[in-house]
Amino acid sequence: MATGAAAVFCVLMAGLIVFQAALIAGAPLGHFAWGGQDRVLPIRKRLGSATSIGLYLIFAVLVLQRAGLADVIPWPGVVTVATWVLAGYFLLGIVLNAASRSRPERWTMAPLCAVLAGLTVLVALG
C-alpha cells in the first residue's frame, strides 16, 4: 500500500511543480496560491514558487525513500521522522488553505493538502 500511496503522492507533486512553474512564468493562476491576492504573481511570490518547487522535489524523494522506492538519504531514522513531519506539514496546510480569502484556493488547495496528508500518513506507516 505504501508504494502505491508514494506513487500517487509523486504524481500530485509533479502536478504542483507544473503549477508553480506556470506561476513563475506569469500564468494568471495566482488566485489559487499565496493567499489569492494576485492573478499574476509579483517577483517575490514567484521566488516563493521557485522555492516550493525545490521543496516538492525533496518531499518526493523523502516519500519515495520511506516507501522503499529510493535510497538517497543514508539515515533511515531521519527519513521516518521527516515523513511524519511532512504529514504534519500537510495537515497544517489544510487549515491554512481553508482559511484563505481566495475561494479558488480554499476549494482546491485545502482538499489537495488533505489528500497529500493522507498519502503521507499511509507511507509513514509503511
Image (cartoon, grey):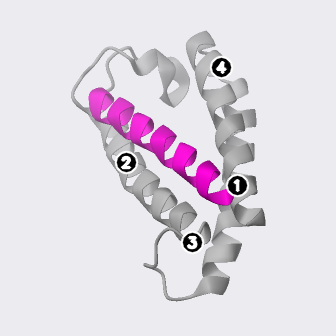
Q: Which of marks 1 and 3 is nearer the N terminus?
A: 1
Which comes sooner in the sequence, label 4 or label 1?
1
Task: Tell me the quarter of the picture where residue 122 sits.
Answer: bottom right
Along the polypeptide, which appears first: circle 2 or circle 3?
2
Q: Looking at the rendering, in which quadrant would you find the N terminus?
A: bottom right
* Residue 116 percent coordinates (x, y): 64, 43
3 and 4 marks in contact (CB < 8 Å): no
Secondary structure, mark 1, is: loop
Return the disc, 2 or 4, that comes first in the chain's sequence: 2
Q: Is residue 79 above or below residue 87?
A: below
Mark 3, secondary structure of its residue: loop
In the rendered image, which residue does mark 4 sit on? 106
Residue interval drawn in magenta: 1-23
**Residue 16 position within the rendered picture, expressed as x and y whole percent measured from the top left:** 43, 36
Direction from residue 68 to residue 48 in the image, left or right:
left
Whether residue 18 sits left or right of residue 52 in the image: it is left
